[in-house]
Amino acid sequence: MNSLRALIVDDSSVMRKIVERSLRQAGLDLNQVLEAGNGAEALAVLQEQQVDLILCDINMPVMDGLEFIKQLGAVEKAKGVPVIMITTEGSESHVVQALSNGARGYIRKPFTPEQVKTQVVPVLAGKS
Amino acid sequence: MSTASELLATSGTRERWTSLMELATREVFQLMLSSELKAATTEADPSQPVTSMVGLAGQLCGVLSVRCEEKAAVQMTCKMLGVPADKVSAEMPDALGEICNMVAGNFKNKITGLGDGCMLSPPTVISGSDYTTYSIADKPALEIRLLFEGMPLVVSLEIHS
C-alpha cells in the first residue's frame, strides 16, 4: 500500500496518538498524520490539505463527528476520501446514522490495532 | 421505555449491572493498555487519588467515576501511549478521562436498549482528595474494586432517578 496521509479527528490528544499508533501497528505506511480536535477544525484542515483517510470521533465539542461527515461533501479537497468513525457511541442508531451520512467504517472504543486494520485496509483497497 | 430506577428495581439487575461494569472496565484495560486487572483483596482506597468522572443523561442518569492513585494514572498513560514515565506529564488527565469515557461507553453499550437512550458528557478529572461531592443519587452506588499493577482502582456508578 502506498504511503498515506491521514487526518485523525478527536478532542482527546491522547486518543489521537493512540489511533496513530494503531494505524502504524496495523502495518499502514503513514507518510503524514494531521490532527484536529473537532469537526470544524478538521474542515479547516481539509480546505488546505489533501488526505487519503480520515478517522473521526463522534462526541466532540464545537462540531461533532456526524455533523462533520455531513459537511464534508462540500469540501472539494475531501471528495471521495473515506471516513471511518472511532467512537464510544456503539448504538445501532449511531452506526446507521454515521454510515448514512457517508462514513465507510465504524470502530467502537475500546479497540485493538487488529480491529483498526480490519476496517481500514479494505476501505483503502476500495473493497468496502 | 423503562427508566434506570425501574430497571434497577427488578430482581438481579443491580448484580448484573455490577458484573457488566466490571467486564466493561476489564475490556478497556485489556484492549487499550494490554493490562489484566486483578480482583482487589482489600477495600483500601487509593492514596493521593486522581478521579475521572463522566456524566450519563437520558434513560440512565448518573455519574460513572474511575479513581486510582496518581502513580497508577501515570502508569496507565504510559501504557496507553507506549512511552516511558518520564515522557508523560500533561497527558495524564486526558488519558484517565478517556479511560473513564470508554468504561462508561462500553458499559452502556452492554445494556440492551440503552445505547440510544443514554448520552455521555465529556470527562472531568480531579486530582487530590480534599473535596466533597453532593449527589442526588437515591440509591447506593454500584462499585467495583480492582487492582491495576497492584494499585487500587475503584469504579463506581451513581444512578439518579
Image (cartoon, rainbow, N blue to C red):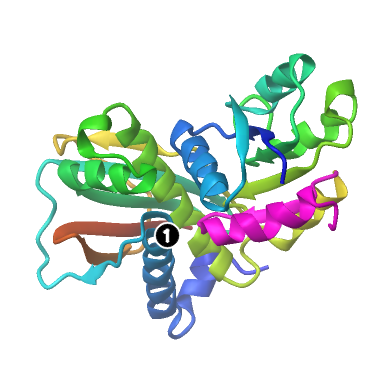
Residue lying at the far bottom in this picture: please name it: B11
Q: Residues within 10 Å of mark 1 (few under 14, many from 20)?
A: many
Where's residue B84, x and y in %?
A: 24, 39
| Residue labelled with disc 1 | B28
Query: Which is nearer the eye, A71 or B76?
Result: B76
Where's residue A103, x and y in %?
A: 79, 46
Query: Which is nearer the eye, B137 or A34?
Result: A34
Where's residue A97, x and y in %?
A: 80, 50
Where does the N terminus of chain B fall, quadrant-wise?
bottom right
Query: Which is nearer the eye, A42 or B143?
Result: A42
Q: Which residues are magenta?
A: A102-128
Residue A104 is left or right of residue B46, and the answer is: right
Query: Which is nearer the eye, A76 or A125?
Result: A125
* Amino acid at circle 1: Val
Residue A126 colored magenta? yes
- Inspect this view and state whether residue B147 appears: yes
Residue pictured at 30% horizontal, 67% vertical: B36
Residue pictured at 54% horizontal, 54% vertical: A109
* A60 vs A87: above or below: above
* Chain ID, mark 1: B
Residue A88 colored magenta? no
Residue pictured at 45% horizontal, 52% vertical: B62
Kindly indicate the quadrant of the structure image that contains residue A3: top right
